[in-house]
Amino acid sequence: MALALPVAAPAADPPTRYSLVHGCYALQSVANGRYVVRRPDASYRAEATTAAGGEAFRMQATALGRYLLYGRDQTVPTRSGASGVIASGDLGPAGDWRVQPAAEGGFRIEALNGGVLAVDEGSGGALIAPPSIAGDAARFRFVAAGNCAIFPEAEVNATGTPARGSSPDADVRGLIDTHNHPINFNFIGGAVHCGRIWSPYGVQKALVDCPDHALVGGGAALLENFLGGNPIGFHDAAGWPTLKDWPRHDSLTHEGAYWRWIERAWRGGLRIMVVDLVDNGVLCRIWPLKNRSCDEMQTIHEQLRYTEQLQDYVDAQFGGPGKGFLRIVKSPDAARRVINDGKLAIVLGMENSEAFNCSLPNDTSACTPQQMEQRLDEMYRLGVRSAFPVHKFDNAFGGTTGDGGLTGVLTNVGNMVGTSHFLRLQRCEAGHQHDRYDLEAFPRIDLVTQLLTLVGLHGALPVYPAGPLCNPRGLSELGKRLIERMIAKGMMVEVDHMSIKTRDEALKLLERRKYPGVLSSHSWSDATTPKRIYKLGGFIGPYAGGSKGFAEEWRTLRKQRDPRFLFGVGYGADINGFGAQGGPRGDNAENPVRYPFRSIDGAVTLDRNRTGTRVFDINKEGVAQYGLYPDWYEDLRKVAGQPIVDDLLRGAEAYLETWERATGVPAPGCKVDAGLFGRSQVGPLRLGEPATALLRRVGQPASRPTRAYRYCVTERDGRQATVAAVFGDDGRTILMATTARQHRVAGLRVGSPARRVGRVAKRIGRGLWIRRARSAGAPRVVLQTRGGRISALAVVTAGTQARASSLRRTLRLAGVR
């Protein structure tokens, strides 16, 4: 249970309210110059004459600028009553202190619920004073100390620095999880999911089981057992630190994405995570245990706030605003910059069954088109960039493809609750794909009757024809309006979970609009969908699951890719979303993952992950929790070799390019006309133009190496050539280079004899020539020669042409050296 986060060394400079994190400090009162000690009666008093004689506090951040002052005996100063301060081992809001710089120097330490920590000037005792108190009594200094207690935390077991990009606008390299639910601890009424991604008060508060699971040795965990296919099951509900029976790859109600496990995945190569905000109001109404509203949009709003709080919490652990390893992003440009800074980009999506509260009671929409648009606009304003029009039940937008097995029984009963009727399944037309419902589980009349009784419903059970079965409900007019509105905003349309008919009609709409922003994020579609998505320029992340099954799906997708677009693949973990993770590979005895191993991008070394007293091994447990995904990447390499590694590492870039196209950036391809050559413009390029503006005006380049965009252009004679823009530190174009033969300067072009260059330009270095500028500081034309002929032409800003060596480096970035 050792502290896995870096322990801050005493800084040479005075600490700030953020740099205190994880440091070991004594607390000195400015009023009397003495150090705070913990007395035997659990009170605190400023009475020690040296820092070594005072209590040593580990500064454990609970949020930005807020701390637990964790003492040597694992207690913290805690507010008691109106003005008392005592040592307590119960970590919570009463022991959570906001540290603020004092105007006169030092710090004020404020209680969350009002009042400030102060020292009684007579006795030296610590107490809570009114917020209005001024002077030295409420000022403290943090003085470096030693022998602090270690605050418990999950380990990461990774060494090395995660890879960064070569420049902010360069191609990114890394993996993408297209479908995840780490912020779900409040969904379905708040009493279904056990544990949470983080707690301000540490791992011992985050990795806990549900109260009802503690009954009958886990036998009362009805939903856990039902979803696991075993109505009578038992498990150890102790949680941290032993975690004896959970997390497991097949446990669907326990926390699987604790924040340190996500950090391990980031260190192992993950660069984008799509966080799908999730709820299911119907299941909330069915499930008897709940502690909050079943309003799905209220839950989504809460999860948006929780995601921002998570970002702040991680920042706090790493030393201040913006210093954490993850950032919420709202555009592909922002995501690219975050990834190239070596961090994890969080993209927000929505997956809820009554999206925008547009349910379908009695086959009537519960929302108007205006209400839908207002709610969509609000979600977009708050940062949501992808959404599922349909999820587990029929709704006002279209029909659902449903589920198989016992889960299908539950969701069909849920459809009755939400729409007042069971799914109206019909036999599919011959040769057509079919939806996911099967008839094997539904004859469990006893189970269906129990579920109906539980929710207070009665009536005849559905009678279906022999399969395969299809949901006849298609895309509604409101569904079409939703997708059109998403297109207008450049949002990503998720087509998983739609019925065969709804998905076909949605794809036809997207095809008519030639809209590339379409996703299948976790294999919840049919065999005809991938090729249509790829033809549009969309992106696919198959359901993760076991490594062998994923590799097979990857091979199938590779055959359907469209050569016009970069091919990369993501994976949809669906962790915390009632989606099982991959179990241990059955044949791994001959080819196991061997610890330690190098990360998929080669930058980090990872050993077996340890959380509390439990050590995880993918060979034995599969992906028991999210921190095992780097191990899963390695398992995929064992199964499918370097080709799958390459496609996974291209996944983040391929997703960003799909997102760019959805926001209006033209698709890649050889530009029809190479255009003209001049001192301010070369083909489609313009000197001084920002990279983002160039991207939106000209389109996606053929490649984005360090600080450059390289485009393919077609000359008048049909030949293909390259024009390239190189960007300065401010992101603006400082050099434009071309290999197109139709571009000319003073009668010379690429391919002209080098002996003629001296007549029109001055030689500044081997193979480099510059024409005289029209005025001081004006751009200049550069001619590059090689092998006795001109090999490239370029235009550079005045600052770039200063020396031959710097000019040569810049031309190399353009790809023409």
Image: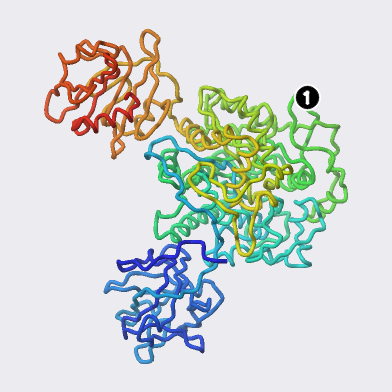
| The quarter of the displayed image where residue 774 is located | top left
Query: In the image, residue 503 lies at what x, y percent?
Result: 65, 31
Q: Confirm whether residue 648 shows in the render.
A: yes
Q: Secondary structure at mark 1?
A: loop
Q: Quadrant of the N terminus?
A: bottom right
Query: In the image, residue 816 lies at what x, y percent?
Result: 33, 23
Q: How many marks?
A: 1
Q: With 724 as the anchor, is 421 left or right in this view?
A: right
Q: Residue at x 40, y 31 (%)?
A: 704
Which residue in the rendered view is the most extreme toward the left?
775
Q: Examine the rendered structure and indicate whether residue 494 appears above or below residue 203.
A: above
Foreground residue among 518 and 461: 518
Query: In the image, residue 109 lies at what x, y percent?
Result: 39, 74
Query: In the image, residue 112 lies at what x, y percent?
Result: 45, 71
Q: With 451 as the anchor, is 268 left or right in this view?
A: left
The amino acid at mark 1 is Glu
Q: Confirm whether residue 482 shows in the render.
A: no
Which residue in the rendered view is the most extreme toward the bottom?
122
Q: Residues within 10 Å of mark 1 (few under 14, many from 20)?
A: few
| The quarter of the displayed image where residue 36 is located | bottom left
Q: Which residue is mark 1?
A: 429
Q: Residue at x 61, y 64 (%)?
A: 612
Q: Residue at x 29, y 12 (%)?
A: 751
Foreground residue among 63 and 24: 24
Q: Quadrant of the C terminus?
A: top left
Q: Residue at x 37, y 26 (%)?
A: 710
